[in-house]
Image (cartoon, rainbow, N blue to C red):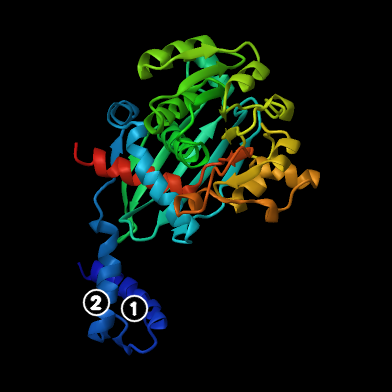
Amino acid sequence: MIRYRIMFNTFASRALRDAARRHQSTPLLLAHPHQVVVSNTTTRIVSRSLAASASFPAPRLFDYATITKNLSVADAIDSVESAFGALAQGNVEVPLPMHIGIHESNVAGPGDCHIKGGYIEGTPTFTVKLACVSFYKNLEKGLPAGSGVFCVVDASTGAPLAFFQENRFMTDLRTGAAGAISLKYTTDPNKSLTVGFIGCGAIARNMARAAHVIRPDMKGVAYGLAGSDEFALEMSEELGVDFEVANSAAELCSKSNCIYTQTTGSAPVLELSMLQPGTTIIASGSDQPTKQEIPVDVLKASKYISDLTKQTSKVGELRSALQAGVMTESDVYCELGELVNGKPGREGDELIVVDLTGTGAQDAAIGQVAWDKLSQL
């Protein structure tokens, strides 16, 4: 027992010295190597430090089935819209994303890992997200090519509250919400709306669902290298709106006044000559430097809106226009949050491009929504 008391007091003495260095105004006296004498202030500081590691409960774990059963894109729209408004006002802490490339070998890859996060001022949690994509060898094993985890953290204590094994489901929800917000502010509510979808995977489905929340009177057109027939049928039945399948991107553009692009390729998916006057393009496929969906002449001709310019200039569509020398950052009309905060969006028949790379603000917003809803289960 004496040995353990000596070990504890030695550890406490070191901790107290560290605390005293951080709080120079608080006196620290070591009367004996194995006896600690301190002021009340320092005692409270060290007591808290020594107790903290043992006081946090284990974070909860929500599996994929629970998440998909209880969350929908409609849950995310209001929260993500508020997050964009706060982001434009400088009230969100959002670091630049981290990208880890996993090169193919006999024990790994190929694939990519994206790490994002953020904190919205005044909210009780913050979020860190790890999203893995393009692990295409998984398909041979009967596994999806993407996976992901959200960690939602108590903003008052810094302790993790929950891990959400969402496998990109929550990411797709907040991306769909951003698409709906983009549509809300860049299309004319007094005109009929036909929405084209180039790329017909999971993100397109959430874009369609979210767009329908904003414009229940919409019609849809689908075009993709694969899955367009299934997508159109599924969305038509689920949303109760007319959907048709186009045979080419040119046909889709000729029938659409709002176009969502969400592909994984690195080549442009449409051309300037295909577009109708007053078209809005909402591009979400480019989220790393190797991707590009929109030609630079389209970007140059557009009223260009970013979700976060410091990010789209590095990994979004804007990057390609900057590299080609046809745009500068001064050509950016605004960020999406500025539209939320009152800046005019659609003003006439101008071409508008909204560049969505995905922000930590969205992750923080959907993380808060998920915690508020699922923690009650």
The structure residue drawn at horizontal position 49% and vertical position 19%, both measured from the top left corner, is: 220
Answer with the quarter of the image where residue 237 lies. Answer: top left
From the viewer's perspective, tell me whether residue 321 is left or right of residue 41.
right
Q: CA distance from mark 2 to mark 1?
A: 11 Å
Tell me the amino acid under the disc marked 2. Arg
Spot occupied by residue 58 in the image (x, y as percentages of width and height): 27, 47
> Residue drawn 57% across and 47% down?
98
10 Å neighbourhood of mark 2: few (<14), some, or many (≥20)? few
Q: Amino acid at mark 1?
A: Leu
The image shows residue 311 at horizontal and vertical percentages of 60, 49
Q: Is residue 226 left or right of residue 65?
A: right
- In the displayed structure, 314 sits above or below 265; it is below
Q: Which residue is mark 1?
A: 16
Q: Secondary structure at mark 2?
A: helix
Residue 159, placed above or below residue 192: below
The residue under the point 54% across, 31% down is 133
Who is closer to the viewer here, 160 or 184?
184
Q: Is residue 340 visible?
A: yes
**Residue highlighted by disc 2:** 44
Q: Residue 7 lies in what quarter of the image? A: bottom left
Identity of the residue drawn at 29% across and 81% down? 42
In this orientation, which residue lies closer to the viewer: 272 or 164?
272
